[in-house]
Image: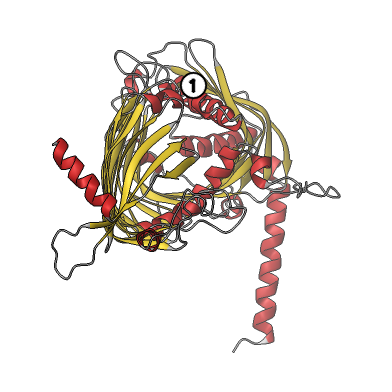
């Protein structure tokens, strides 16, 4: 048991140690020369940069404050793959370690760069060509030690054409793991009008530029907003609908994000083995989680051609942003047909993604994507997917072409759906639409199989629609259609109900649902026209057949069909119709109109059948 004497000795020892440390800090300018201080700071910077960054010889230690050294207006410089780089720092603070200082040695514990500007200048478009073959074998670099903190940093790139691109407001803290080669990363990055908080770990920074790569983990989350004291945050206008405040396109994107589980401000977590060069980035054995999604796989992104990489990245970012902005503006103005289709920004990118999606939910239903593959290059991209879950199974692909050899951008879709639950899928799709003003519509039920093969091209969405070619085939079974009870309506006609007279008026269908056993449909697309070449529904006591077409340029449609009530038979013999009700479908795709014709029954059906036989 420690006695009071023991505790007193320990306390006195601690006081002596603290006094020695304080005296050492106060005597730092007298114990250690400026040359040794500069050498310590230089060694620390060189360790973290692989020897590339070294303190200028004319840097002057401007002040000592305890164990913190201050250096002002320092400038670093050098070359990287033929490009020149320069770092201008307003203020550098170096905190030295206590224990080595007691031995008369100077070791930097933390290096802080305040308001640095990182500037990269590329005079020749092929200056970085020598680095194209990276990654190479792992380099033998010194292991980082201590910490480096960067506050309010700005990055500027100047290309051979004189274009300047840059961004600022970067805060980072890099801390070496004393027990390994790993480095911990925390900080904040600008993201649009807000900021992202960053946390991560890189197991071996030197291996990133090698074939081996380094295991890494990165977590991104939106930074909490801070308001100026005394200034209340802006309040949304409750008299304006949310969709009107933020625009139709953004509102639709939010609904889609909610349907696939990307809701709230939850973090994005990325893990994998990272390799990098100035023109490429690879992540192997990666996992990405965000909201209700968990994806796993491999990703590689490279920049093609000889143009400077920063110029190419700027081209991609500006092109994608402009394409989104122009298309959204046209849709917001109600002119969706004039929305431009711009895919040229894909041209510098070479992307390969092989992934799978598991433990995820889509519109409230479980989904597992067994195969997701994205390949992009030479201005073209193709996405293939094989997914299954509570909504059924989907296999197919989407191909995009920035510009076909002899014309505008081209889009193609091919795939099939198997065992799709139409009711659950319809309810999921309703979550993507604006909230209904009244009760949501009743949806068809049943199981659907579908095959899609379409291709189109055009500079605008309207041109894409009017030039589509291909076919859609669908088969459904064991379901029902909402809106009317067709057998009950036809039975009323069979019992002698009159319609289209002054007393009885037009045909008003009986309310309810119509069950069906099978349904088949086929739509053939030729430029400007969608033709319904087959539409047939079979139920327990009825059948429906229809043919028609729609003008995709103006949206007008026209179709003719027949609904027949069949006799009840004990066996599966061909049942004769009791009532035959012709109908027509007109109007537009957005507002179709159904008109019933004059029904036929009894002797009328017999005479019609006989006359048709005589004509034959």
Q: Residue at x 68, y 83 (%)?
A: 5
Which residue is at the front of the view, 338 or 82? 338
Q: The C terminus is located in which quarter? A: top left
Q: Residue at x 31, y 18 (%)?
A: 404
Residue sticking out furthest to the right: 230
Residue 142 placement (x, y as % from top left): 40, 41
On the question of residue 411 being in view, the answer is yes
Which residue is at the front of the view, 244 or 573? 573
Please tell me how crowded label 1 is: few (under 14), some (14-19), or many (20+) other residues with Cα within 10 Å.
some
Q: Label 1 belongs to which residue?
A: 78
Residue 164 placement (x, y as % from top left): 56, 18
Q: Is residue 439 left or right of residue 131?
A: right
Residue 215 placement (x, y as % from top left): 36, 49
**In the rendered view, how is the structure colored?**
secondary structure
Q: The N terminus is located in which quarter? A: bottom right
Which residue is at the front of the view, 562 or 351? 562
Task: From this view, report whether residue 476 is shown above or below residue 142.
Answer: below
Q: Is residue 557 left or right of residue 562?
A: right
Q: Residue at x 42, y 55 (%)?
A: 426
On the question of residue 175 being in view, the answer is no
Label 1 sits on a secondary structure element that is: strand
Q: Is residue 155 left or right of residue 279?
A: right
Task: From this view, report whether residue 415 is shown above or below residue 429.
Answer: above
Residue 309 placement (x, y as % from top left): 42, 22
Q: Residue at x 54, y 14 (%)?
A: 163
Tally the marks.
1
Q: Is residue 190 left or right of residue 262?
A: right
Which residue is at the front of the view, 603 or 521? 603
């Amino acid at each position: 048991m420690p006695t009071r004497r023991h505790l007193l000795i320990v306390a006195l020892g601690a006081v002596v140690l603290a006094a020695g440390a304080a005296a050492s800090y106060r005597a730092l300018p007298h114990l250690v020369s400026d040359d040794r201080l500069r050498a310590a700071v230089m060694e620390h910077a060189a360790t973290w940069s692989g020897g590339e960054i070294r303190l200028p010889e004319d840097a002057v230690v401007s002040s000592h404050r305890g164990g913190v050294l201050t250096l002002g207006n320092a400038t670093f410089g050098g070359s990287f793959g033929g490009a020149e780089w320069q770092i201008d720092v307003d203020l550098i603070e170096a905190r030295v370690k206590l224990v080595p200082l007691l031995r008369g040695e100077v070791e930097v514990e933390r290096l802080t760069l305040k308001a640095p500007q990182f500037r990269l200048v590329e005079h020749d478009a092929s200056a970085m060509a020598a680095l194209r073959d990276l990654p190479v074998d792992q380099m033998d670099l010194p292991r980082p030690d201590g910490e480096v903190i960067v506050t309010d940093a700005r990055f500027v790139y100047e290309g051979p054409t004189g274009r300047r691109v840059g961004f600022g407001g970067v805060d980072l803290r890099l801390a070496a793991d004393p027990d390994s080669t790993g480095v911990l990363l925390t900080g904040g990055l600008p993201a649009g009008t807000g900021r992202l908080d960053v946390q991560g770990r890189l197991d071996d920074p030197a291996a990133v530029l090698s074939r081996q790569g380094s295991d890494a983990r990165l977590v991104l989350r939106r930074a909490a907003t801070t308001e100026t004291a005394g200034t209340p945050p802006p309040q949304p206008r409750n008299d304006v609908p949310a969709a009107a405040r933020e625009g139709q396109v953004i509102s639709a994107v939010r609904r889609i994000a909610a349907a696939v589980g990307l809701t709230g401000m939850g973090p994005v977590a990325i893990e994998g083995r990272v390799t990098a060069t100035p023109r490429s980035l690879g992540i192997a054995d990666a996992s990405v989680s965000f909201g209700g999604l968990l994806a796993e796989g491999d990703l590689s992104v490279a920049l093609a051609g000889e143009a400077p990489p920063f110029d190419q990245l700027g081209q991609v970012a500006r092109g994608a942003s402009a394409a989104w902005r122009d298309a959204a503006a046209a849709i917001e103005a109600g002119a969706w047909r004039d929305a431009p289709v711009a895919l040229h920004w894909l041209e510098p990118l070479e992307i390969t993604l092989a992934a799978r999606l598991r433990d995820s939910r889509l519109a409230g239903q479980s989904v597992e994507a067994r195969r997701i593959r994205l390949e992009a290059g030479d201005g073209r991209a193709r996405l293939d997917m094989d997914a299954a879950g509570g909504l059924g199974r989907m296999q197919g692909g989407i191909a995009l072409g920035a510009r076909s050899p002899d014309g505008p951008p081209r889009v193609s879709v091919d795939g099939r759906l198997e065992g799709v639950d139409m009711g659950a899928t319809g309810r999921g799709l309703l979550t993507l639409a604006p909230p209904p003003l009244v009760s949501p519509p009743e949806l068809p039920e049943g199981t659907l199989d579908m095959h899609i093969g379409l291709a189109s091209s055009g500079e605008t969405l309207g041109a894409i629609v009017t030039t589509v070619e291909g076919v859609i085939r669908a088969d459904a079974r064991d379901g029902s259609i909402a809106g009317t009870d067709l057998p009950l309506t036809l039975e009323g006609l069979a019992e002698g109900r009159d319609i289209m007279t002054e007393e009885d008026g037009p045909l008003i269908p009986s309310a309810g649902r119509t069950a069906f056993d099978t349904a088949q449909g086929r739509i053939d697309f030729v430029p400007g026209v969608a033709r319904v070449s087959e539409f047939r529904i079979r139920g327990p006591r009825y059948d429906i057949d229809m043919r028609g077409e729609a003008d995709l340029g103006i949206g007008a449609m026209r179709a003719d069909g027949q609904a027949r009530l069949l006799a009840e038979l004990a066996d599966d013999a061909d049942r004769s119709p009791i009532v035959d009700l012709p109908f027509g479908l007109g109007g537009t795709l957005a507002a179709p109109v159904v008109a019933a014709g004059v029904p036929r029954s009894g002797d009328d059906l017999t005479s019609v059948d006989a006359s048709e036989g005589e004509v034959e």
